[in-house]
Image (cartoon, grey):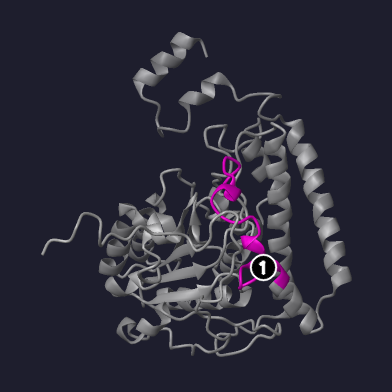
Amino acid sequence: MVPSSGKNLNVPTPRHRPGEEPEFDDLDIPNAGAAPRPDILTDPKEMFAYANTMIRVLDMKNKAVGEWNPCLSPDDLRKGLTDMMITRIYDDRMQNMQRVGKMSFYMKSRGEEAVAVAQAMALDKKDMLFPSYRQQGLLISRGRDLLDMMNHCLSNSGDNCKGRQLPIMYTWKEGNFFSISGNLGTQFCQAVGWAVASVYKGEDAIASTWVGEGTTAESDFHHGMTFAAVYNAPVLLNVVNNQWAISSFQGFAGGERATFASRGIGYGMPGLRVDGNDFLAVYAATKWAAERARCGGGPTMIEHFTYRAGGHSTSDDPAKYRPEDEPEVWPLGDPIERLKNHLIEIGEWSDERHEQTAKDITALVTKKYKEAESYGTLNSGARPEVSSMFEDVFKEMPDNLRRQRQQLGV
């Protein structure tokens, strides 16, 4: 018998709608420390369970437990905490500047800071980064001057992209940070190609790339996964599952049927599912995958289970599609608060020190912004020379562009 039209269709529905009371009681969250840490060269066929559990290190009492505990020094933990705080305070300032018309657009990473900062610290600086648009913590942790980041977002005369890129789509050649693309997913293929080239050149640098869970529905995701698996490329393929792709929740990308980490299984690579709000877990999983890649073990897919606490961008109002207080009840908490409380638990931090650090960072961000504003904003200041539109496209300028430039008299 043919079923009636639409009878067996599934239309994904988010857990909560605006006006409803959010709760996550049925979310399956394993205990911290429950997952064992396998050898870095374990056969992917023996690792199916890692795609369906969750690697966690920090427990509810702010202690680091289990085999995945990376046992970082207090100095490294403080650096991680400080870099996450800088990222958040920087984000807040830049969004405020967009709201008052000083820049055209911005995207915050609130709630996801641990993903970028912990991974930047776990990777070597020689490793190449192919980010999406919510990993500004990579730049901050690698030492990018906030002034340069601000100049780019303001599209002023100090912008290293010369006003040709959307704000937040940074690039930093010296820091091995590949240019961000607005065409979502392209970075997966680019990262794999770069990783293959690294092997061909006899180097041990690896690549790491990031997409949101919504982008896993794009073809470039699958092209990159296939390419990585077939060539055994030394690359980390990160999926940041922050529950929301713009205004559509992760069910529209298949998140209700299976974990995103389990997609690695079909390609013959390990799939690790990690508590993305646990700085130590993210660091440990990244270190494991990086060591595996450097030792010839090939690619690893990592799903970072986290939550986008703010809007998708300054063009988005999340109150239109989810309860306003949903971020506050997210059961895996806030990454900054969790690492802060862990440092306090081990006697290496305090509320007073945290408050002073926040004040110092705010003062630094304010100082950098005032300097950036002196070079111009969206509506004021110097602009790049008109002649610059002909530059930086071809290594040798072709005759037709040379003639066009001459016709413009520039």
Q: Overall secondary structure of the magenta stretch?
A: loop
Q: Which residue does the image show at 66% across and 68% down from the upper left?
A: 335
Quarter of the figure that contains the N terminus: bottom left
Question: What type is the residue that disc 1 sits on?
Answer: Asp
In this picture, residue 377 sits left or right of residue 168: right
Find the magenta span and give its range.
313-337
Instruction: Tell me residue 50's x, y (percent).
Output: 42, 81
Any part of residue 194 in sight: no
Q: Is residue 140 magenta?
A: no
Any part of residue 287 in sight: yes
Instruction: Tell me residue 316's x, y (percent).
Output: 57, 43
In this picture, residue 67 sits left or right of residue 377: left
Circle 1 is placed at which residue position?
A: 334
Count of all numbered marks drawn on residues in the image? 1
Image vertical order of residue 292 relative to residue 373, above or below: below
Q: Determine crowd level at label 1: few under 14, some 14-19, many 20+ residues with C-alpha closer than 10 A.
A: many
Q: Which residue does the image show at 62% across and 36% down from the upper left?
A: 159
Image vertical order of residue 194 relative to residue 347, above or below: above
Location of residue 199 by image quarter: bottom left
Location of residue 118 by image quarter: bottom right
Instruction: Tell me residue 228's x, y (percent).
Output: 32, 65
Instruction: Tell me residue 210's x, y (percent).
Output: 47, 59
In this picture, residue 234 sits left or right of residue 60: left
